[in-house]
Amino acid sequence: MKRDKDYVVKDGEVIIVDEFTGRLMYGRRYSEGLHQAIEAKEGVKVERESKTLATITFQNYFRMYDKLAGMTGTAQTEEQEFRAIYGLDVVVIPTNKEMIRIDHPDVIYKTEEAKFKAVVEDIVEHHKKGQPVLVGTITIEKSEKLSNMLKKLGIKHQVLNAKYHEKEAEIIAQAGRKGAVTIATNMAGRGTDIILGGNPEFLAKKKMVEEGYAPDVISEASGFGPLNSEELIKARERYQELLNEIKKETEKEHEEVVKLGGLYIIGTERHESRRIDNQLRGRAGRQGDPGESRFYISLEDDLMRLFGSERIKNMMNSLGIEDDQPIEHKILTKQIEQAQKKVEGINFDVRKNVLEYDDVMNKQREIIYKERRKVLEGEDLRQYILDMVKDIIKRNVEIYTAGSKYPEEWDIDGLLNHLYDLFLEKDSVVIDVDYGRLDKEMLTDIIYEEAVRQYEKKEQQIGPQMREIERVVLLKVVDTRWMDHIDEMDQLRQGIGLRAYGQVDPVIEYKKIGFDMFEDLVNSIQEDTVKFLYHIEIRNDNMPHREQVAKPVATNQSGNDEPKKPIVKKKKVGRNDPCPCGSGKKYKKCCGANL
């Protein structure tokens, strides 16, 4: 795990960076002590290991919807996966206006150093003539390396990565201005249009901030909803004035940028997923605008090292090609796309495999959540609890009478002692029946009748509160046992792959063992619930109540649950100043005398 690639350290916290979007994932933590290890490495406070309360894969989460559909500009490369997992076809809709962007072939360099030098030279060349440039990098580290190289040359630019998360929309909106240079990690800020010549709405809002308008007033002024105060009406009028003024400038700048060739996209590395490369490329050439794109690659890049960089390196050496001399050919671009397809295929197989395992958990999840819903929706659980009691008795009768069909050979004392330990009162059941007529069903009925009698007695002691107690106890037991079960299934999943060495399909083994473990889970939920309810006592009206197990994740940037409050600076009262209480005395002789 590398700092500023897989995670960032912010406000004394380790925050995970999403590898696909480059955005920070507040509230998410690595499991199995990995997050704690990173916290120790970075010298920040080591937090407690978080407990998994629930788990689901994205695929099964999406499949819970009755209708599934989506719209994106980059779905075609993932067509096979959409069809295999969701049963969705991918339909390509023609662009609204003709696509006139020029996509140049990839340029390949021997070393990463030579590649970055070439990228900087390309940026300088296009910046000189005023063409806006958007550079895509794979990691925060690479974006900062490139930024430092540009600073040395005195080229003004903007950096957009997880470190500048809050300003991402504002930065990306102005990437199409004349002479703008923007460096972005994995194209964060995708909800914003890059308009050639600049985005007039963002510029108008920025102007209003400079004029001293509050953020909530600007938000109302730039919206379209009805306004209920004179201040907001005036603010909207001012916003419209500014917008019209700025639009004249941006339209003029738009024409200039179009003549310069539109937005120029530079990719500093090919990503494992072609989809992300296409998302970067797709930022240029919107709505019939002109644009260009080019990817720079070195033989030291991760993707190239995985797929055939040695062969190309040998070829370059045999041709006597220098480090800073590039190779550019459509065949090489095709080869790189093939390598990406291979990686995507591997990743798809991994996701498919994960889904096969999660399908086992998914069936169990549906059953458990169905039971929880009964509790949460306030169903009367009395009969449900008594059915549990009957199931426990039946199960134990089967265990203690197994191995013989003759009642005199059954271990009835062992059965009763076990049930006394679980929930029944000591010596409350008397099996005073002629062994000749006794069968398993009769034995179950005798014990069950006594269990019902004892439960009714408990209900009379507690009164009408018993219905709510049933719900609280069952909810608590289900949640506790389910969390343990998730951990156990996860441990099983980690070791089950070794079964393949014994010529056994790990997925089938996982299903078999998972089924047995789920049966044990159901049995333990029944036994724990019944045991609690039969032994519960309420003292001093101390009613058990439902608790929220999952606490909300902090959404503010500091990571605290509390919303940030403005800092109010209080005026300090001097010792010789008049006392603020209004007595007319000096502060040191009045309220400040004891301080």
Image (cartoon, rainbow, N blue to C red):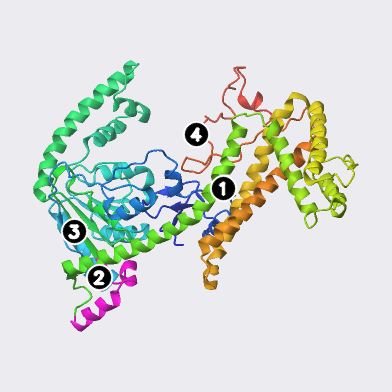
Q: Amino acid at mark 4?
A: Ile
Q: Is residue 276 left or right of residue 286?
A: right
Residue 527 at x, y percent in the picture:
73, 45
Residue that mark 3 sits on: 124
State the quadrant of the C terminus.
top right
Identify the residue shown where x is 35% and y is 54%.
81
Q: Are marks 2 and 1 in contact (CB under 8 Å)?
A: no
Q: Amino acid at mark 1?
A: Gln
Task: Tell me which amino acid carries mark 3.
Answer: Val
* Nearest to viewer (mark 2 / mark 4): 2
Residues rendered magenta in the picture = 297-320
Q: Which residue does the numbered mark 4 point to in the structure image?
A: 567
Cα distance between the residues tagged 2 and 1? 55 Å
Q: What element does badge 1 sit on?
A: helix
Disc 4, SS: loop
Q: Which mark is residue 364?
A: 1
Contact check, label 4 and label 1, Cβ < 8 Å: no
Q: Which mark is residue 114?
A: 2
